[in-house]
Image (cartoon, rainbow, N blue to C red):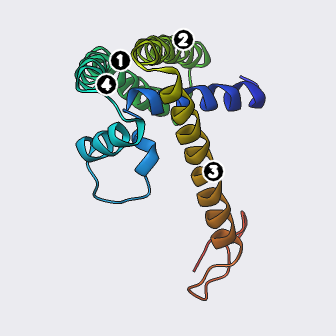
Amino acid sequence: MKRASWIALSVCVIVAGAAIAGFAAYEHGNPGMGMRMRFERMAVRLKLTPAQETQIKADLKQARTNARPDIDSMRNLRATLAKQIFTDHPDQAAIQKNADQLKQQLAAMIDQYVKAGLQINGVLASDQRVEVQKIIVEHQQLAERRRARWQQHREHPTSGQQPATPDQPRQ
């Protein structure tokens, strides 16, 4: 796949994943905070009614149940693909077959994310959807700040080590 396609796919997965995970990314920067706590914070921020909470929890549980076999299958397929790639004599046909299968499974998973997101969206009121949009933007900004900090760390490590170069590993 071309780089732009991968980037677009990644953005779709991130945005859809935020919806499925109960917009858990809202507090992602808080280590140790469990899924339930993140959901509760999201519920408070969106001012969900008890009926909305019940319905969204049911939708999320169903989405996780549906996604679990795909996640396990994709993990196994990625491991198989890595083993096939890093052999003395890689079989291009087998590698391509597994890569295509992985792409199909990823596309199916994205379809499930979209379906779950639309179900949750159907439960929300208009003002709650506006708040969800704010949460998504905040998550994207948080991710960008983390990428920038990581990049800065890679370029200027604080431990006195020089950044690694392709021809010279870190010491």
Q: Where does the image place residue 92, in percent across and percent down from the top left?
A: 61, 18
Residue nearer the viewer, 92 or 128: 128
Amino acid type at mark 2? Lys
- Is 146 left, or right, of 148 in this rendering? left
Q: CA distance from mark 1 to mark 4?
A: 5 Å
Which one is in front in this view, the residue at disc 3 or the one at disc 1? Answer: 3
* Disc nearer the start of the sequence (2/3): 2
Amino acid type at mark 3? Gln
Q: Where does the image place residue 164, in percent across and percent down from the top left?
A: 67, 71
Q: Please tell me whether mark 4 sits on a helix, a strand or a loop.
A: helix
Tell me whether circle 1 and circle 2 mark residues in contact (CB < 8 Å): no
Tell me whether circle 1 and circle 4 mark residues in contact (CB < 8 Å): yes
Q: CA distance from mark 2 to mark 3?
A: 37 Å
| Residue with the most extreme bottom position | 160
Question: In which quadrant of the rendered image does the N terminus lie?
Answer: top right
Which residue is denoted by mark 4 in the rendering? 72
User: Which residue is located at x 41 percent, y 51 percent?
Assistant: 27
Which one is in front in this view, the residue at disc 4 or the one at disc 2? Answer: 4
Which one is in front in this view, the residue at disc 1 or the one at disc 2? Answer: 1
* Disc nearer the start of the sequence (3/1): 1
- Is residue 69 shown above or below 45? above
- How packed is label 2: few (under 14 Cα within 10 Å), some, or many (20 or more)? few
Which residue is denoted by mark 3 in the rendering? 141
User: Which residue is located at x 35 percent, y 17 percent?
Assistant: 70
Q: Where does the image place residue 34, in percent across and percent down from the top left?
A: 25, 48
User: Which residue is located at x 47 percent, y 33 percent?
Assistant: 18
